[in-house]
Amino acid sequence: MRTLIIEDENLSAQRLEAMLKTYDPEIQVLAQLPSVTESVQWLRQNEAPDLVFMDIHLEDDLCFKIFELAPLTAPVVFTTAYDEYMIKAFKVNSIDYLLKPVNLVELIGALDKYKSLKAQFSKPDFNTLLQYIGQRDTEYKTRFMVTIGTKIRSIETSEIAYFYSDEKITFMATKEGQHLPVDFSLDKLSGLLDPRQFFRVSRQYLVGFSAIHSVLTHFKGKLKLELLPKARHEVFVNGDRMTDFKEWLGK
């Protein structure tokens, strides 16, 4: 069996490959790809695999972008630590949806299912899948676990004013004024948070609607945001994002 692993967490990809080898040492992992861009390039240049294991949140976008940009007709086993609302949608693909951390028993079940369906497998109905994904009742991340000293605390998303990146570390700023590191990039957070409440105004800032105190015009053709609590950097909305930002403010 020729498999492809699309996963942006290196340890998760290595662990999955090891479990596949435990199931069947003859399984061949053709590649481990961390992003939409690399996956599309690989799929365009190589023969299709027999089976794909695919995380949902990749380092540059949601995995569903791959189906828009590359020919992928192989069956897919989706793996993710989030978005449990998608379980029903993924079942239309007739393979499986595995929650992280993937355990060997569930993986064996997915592989056995693939083998039993191989003869009659048809192209997954990704149009139906994407319709589910686009529904307004999508469940977004509602809380984050953070470490404060020796304590672990759960913070509700509603308590967060904005996220920002500084020295390659992502921080959340709570409405109480705390600045705490989080284990997600801004790219990944963009897919986890409700887009009606949070907007990526720049490469450095992802802001919550309730955190915007005022919006000022700037002489360089940008918009300047004043946030509460006050941001540690000047926060601008660049020109290529201004139209979408203004539409978002008016929703």
Image (cartoon, rainbow, N blue to C red):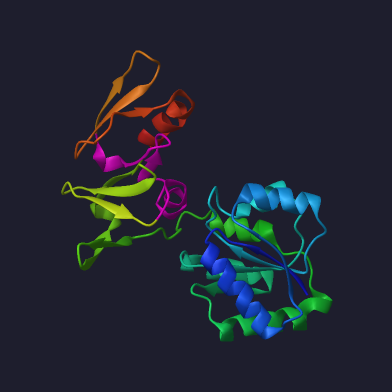
Residue at left 57%, top 83%? Answer: 104
Q: Position of residue 219 (x, y in %)?
A: 34, 13
Out of 58 and 225, give the one closest to the viewer.
Answer: 58
| Image location (x, y in percent) of residue 195 | 42, 46
Q: Quadrant of residue 162?
A: top left
Q: Nearer the viewer, residue 43 or 89?
A: 43
Residue at the outermost top position: 219
Q: Residue at x 55, y 60 (%)?
A: 56
Image height of 180 relative to 103, above or below: above
Q: Is residue 203 visible?
A: yes
Which quadrant of the figure contains the C terminus? top left
Outermost left residue? 176
Q: Is residue 79 visible to us here?
A: no
Residue 213 position, x and y percent, is: 22, 33
Q: Nearer the viewer, residue 109 or 183?
A: 183
Give the answer, above or below, for where 237 lies relative to 103: above
Please name the residue shown 83% across and 78% down the image.
Answer: 119
* Residue 64, quarter of the rendered image: bottom right
Residue located 78% across and 75% down the image: 1
Where is residue 173? Give x, y as percent: 25, 47
Q: Nearer the viewer, residue 88 or 113?
A: 113
Q: Is residue 7 magenta?
A: no
Q: Please say whether residue 196 is one of the residues in the magenta stretch.
A: yes
What is the span of residues highlighted in magenta in the rendered image?
Answer: 184-212
